[in-house]
Image (cartoon, rainbow, N blue to C red):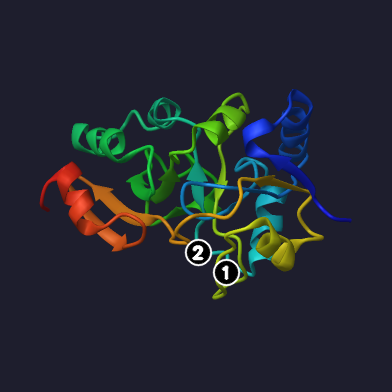
Amino acid sequence: MKPEIIHLNRFTQTEQSLLFELLNAGEVIAYPTDTIYGLGVDIYNPAAVAKLQHLKGRESRKPFSVLYPSVNKLLAEFDHLTQFQKMAVRRLMPGMVTLLLPVEKEHQFPAPFVSAGLIGVRVVDLPELNRLLAIYPHPISSTSINLAGAKPATSVAEIERYFGFEIPLIIDNGNTDSGQSSTIIKITGNTWEIIREGAVSKTQVEECLGSH
């Protein structure tokens, strides 16, 4: 069965309710970001996370990131951060970055999202998506739509080519502009390090956070 298509800029209340029902039921959905499309599940639903791992063909030790609908919601779960780390979040987000932040305690988040005491988090610069997800009670996963090692999907057609009969719903926002992934930045203590340069350059990060 082909997936239901929701158009991000004109979704209805009924479509939003369907999205939440699917997430709550442990389904995997596809959604746009300010970089490339992503796969989303409720991060606190173990069966959904296992389904996502199977879909991606990903080794269990390689963590997924977490998508929040606002900076305020993110920081509410990370009140243990240092002032520098909170400043970094506010200066870089929302935006085309994934920040690796320290977790407060070992079991603060499910294991598939944490590695070496760090978790990747995103708040994308896409107000319509943030508005759509804002009232769902849990954050969802953030990971590119592709099989391991393959090119990430940048359109609904490519999503359907990869997982057309395994994803019940796609949120459509047209083709993504750059096709670049987010820049991954590790924020520890009072310093930062780029782990993967993507849509945001090192120079742009330095402009926000200073040299490291």
Q: Residue at x 67, y 42 (%)?
A: 45
- Residue at label 2? 62
- Residue 207: x, y in percent? 16, 46
Mark 1 surroundings within 10 Å by alpha-carbon count, few (fewer than 14), some (14 through 19), many (20 or more)? few
- Residue 113: x, y in percent? 50, 51
Q: Residue at x 61, y 30 (%)?
A: 132
Mark 2 surroundings within 10 Å by alpha-carbon count, few (fewer than 14), some (14 through 19), many (20 or more)? few
Dot 1: element: loop
Q: Residue furthest left?
A: 211
Q: Residue at x 37, y 43 (%)?
A: 95
- Residue 27: x, y in percent? 75, 47
Q: Is residue 193 above or below residue 82?
A: below
Q: Is residue 73 above or below residue 200?
A: above
Q: Nearer the viewer, residue 59 or 39?
A: 39
Q: Is residue 155 visible?
A: yes
Q: Is residue 190 visible?
A: no
Q: Nearer the viewer, residue 176 or 188?
A: 176
Dot 2: element: loop
Are the two marked residues, 2 and 1, in contact with CB atoms closer than 8 angstroms? yes
Q: Amino acid at mark 1?
A: Glu
Q: Residue at x 72, y 50 (%)?
A: 47
- Residue 46: x, y in percent? 67, 47
- Residue at label 1? 59
Q: Is residue 64 above or below residue 124?
A: below
Q: Quadrant of residue 91?
A: top left
Is 2 left, or right, of 111 in this rendering?
A: right
